[in-house]
Structures are given as structure tokens and as C-alpha cells.
Image (spheres, rainbow, N blue to C red):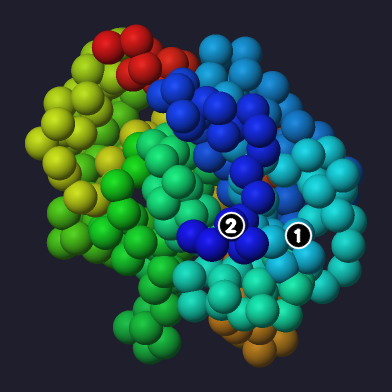
Amino acid sequence: MNNNQIKINSKIKEAIQNNKPIVALESTLISHGLPYPDNINVANESIKAVEKSGSIAATIGIINGIIKIGLNKDDIEILASTKNVEKVSLHNIALSLFNKKNAATTVAATINIASKIGINFFATGGIGGVHLDSENNSDISADLTELSRTKMFVVSSGAKSILDLEKTYEKLETLGIPRISYNSNFMPGFWYEETTYSVDQNFKKINDIANYLKLINNLNHQSSILIFNKIPKGKDIEKKLIEKWIFQSVKKAEQKNIKGKDLTPFLINEINKLSKNKTLEANKTLIINNALLAGKIAKAFSLI
């Protein structure tokens, strides 16, 4: 990348040069995923969680047309509170730079940028996937394509519950993306602990995950590796309730003709209303928890 297009925080630049453990964090959850001021609090708590583990956090976003690796508090405030912050994936990163926009990077955009500068780990709440009713609208997140072609160790709580989890699981299999889990035999359901879709292996120890990742790295595997981390017990929500709220919210979206990039934030907001903020609290918990696990694995990986 051209130096005029990217600005790397000095602490992160030094960490890259010296092979220190770094975890990339996305910024879409700041601008589109969480309401103000929860978005600021979660962004800052995620950074603290990574640092608590002994790794370095690198929140990625675009400020005034410059890709910034390691957003500071002012940058986070801009993305959290400014209207018309763009949500950028791979197809529109260049336009946001060209037009000197403030923009938040999706999972796909974040791992693409992070991999190009030598960051190996990434934490998020949930990945994108195959949308409901995809047979009629072919709506599949660019996250899946990018995960299939970019080497990154990705910690998440599975795909977001509002997606078609069965088809997302099948798509991950088709794309050959390895799926492992920490303390579970199944892919998580984001807001609920477990789906019925099994993972390649359940790891009980962080050091074992780090050793596996080192091995797969030595094999020069080219896709991302998904490391699933279920939502902490007590913050999870009953699957039947989630499914009921999703059904009601999807119906409302259809009535209002809400589609495309506006659909996900609409559904998340509607489901949060129906849950009386339970899903918001679950979101906040799992995002920070995933940042902490990613930091621990990255630290263990760096010591091998």
C-alpha cells in the first residue's frame, strides 16, 4: 500500500517489525453495530482486553480518506458519533479514500488490510454469511469470499444469528475454510451458545490452538482459520426466543421494504427492542470476550 493512503500507529509499526503479537479489530461495530455511547465503550474495552492478554490491539478504520491502523480515541469518537459514516467492504474501499470519507471497515475489509501489513490475528463479534431467503436474492456476505482467500486467524462467535446459519456452515465447508472451536464441539449461534453444526476440532487449551495455528501456518494454508468462541454462560439467550424475534423482525423489514446493507442494522435494532436490550448486552459481552481470547492466542502463538 502507498504510504499516502495508510497511517500505522507507531506502537503497531514497531510491533509488526519485531513480530510482537497483534490483534486487528474492525470498526463497523463502532459505526453501525452498536448504539452510542455503547459503541465507544465496547471499542475501548476490546482494546483493553487485547492489551490485558499481552498482545497489541490494532483497530482499523478510515479517517478523512486515510486508512488508519490503530485508531485513537478521537478517531473512535468520529466513527461512533458522526452521521453518514460509510460502511466499506472490498468493493468500495478505494472510493472512500478517493472521496476522503470517514468509513468503517467490515470483516472482509479489515482482514484484507491487516493481512497486507503483516497482522495475523483478528477478533470480531460475528462474521457475515448467507442471508435468509438467499435462494431468492443471492445475498451472501463478502466476508465469506475474503475468508476463503486471505490468511488470517479469526476469533468470532460464529455467524450472526440473523443469517441462515445452516447455509453459512455449508458455504464455509464448500470454501474449505477450517473451523475449530474453544471449549465446544459445535459452531456457536452468536447470541446463543451452540448450533448443531460440528467443528473440525474442539480445543480445550489456548496453547494447543496456538500450536495448531503454527502448524497450519507452516503448511502455507491460504484461507483464514475460524476459531469459534461461544458467548459466556449467563449472557446467552434461548435459541427459541432468538428465532421468534428474528421472524418478527424479518416480517417488519419486508413490510418496510428494507433490503441490502440497511437490512442487518435494522434487524439487529428491532431484535434488540423485542429482547428489551438483552441482545445488545450479549453483543457487548461476546465482542470483548472474543478480543480477549484472540489476544491470548496471539500471545501464545508469538512464544512458540
Query: What x and y, as percent, mark residue 141?
Result: 43, 69
Q: In which image quadrant can residue 253 be found?
A: bottom right
Instruction: Name the amino acid type tagged 2.
Output: Asn
Task: List the residue tagged with mark 1.
Answer: 63
Between the C-alphas of marks 2 and 1, the distance is 15 Å
Question: Which residue is pictured at 86% across the width and 54% down the height?
Answer: 78
Decide: few, some or many residues near mark 1? Use Cα within 10 Å; few <14, some 14-19, many ≥20: many
Query: Which amino acid, by three-letter code, is at mark 1?
Result: Ile
Question: Compared to 208, does 133 lie above or below?
Answer: below
Relative to residue 136, is residue 156 depicted above or below?
A: above
Q: Is residue 7 above or below residue 235?
A: below
- The residue where tag 2 is placed is 3
Residue 131 appears in view: yes
Q: Are marks 2 and 1 in contact (CB under 8 Å)?
A: no
Q: Residue at x 15, y 41 (%)?
A: 220
Which SS class for mark 1? Answer: strand
- Measuring from the top left, give residue 155's x and y in whole percent: 43, 36
On the image, the x and y values in percent for residue 246 come to 57, 62
Residue 72 pos. (x, y %): 78, 39
The residue lying at 66 percent from left, 89 percent from top is 257
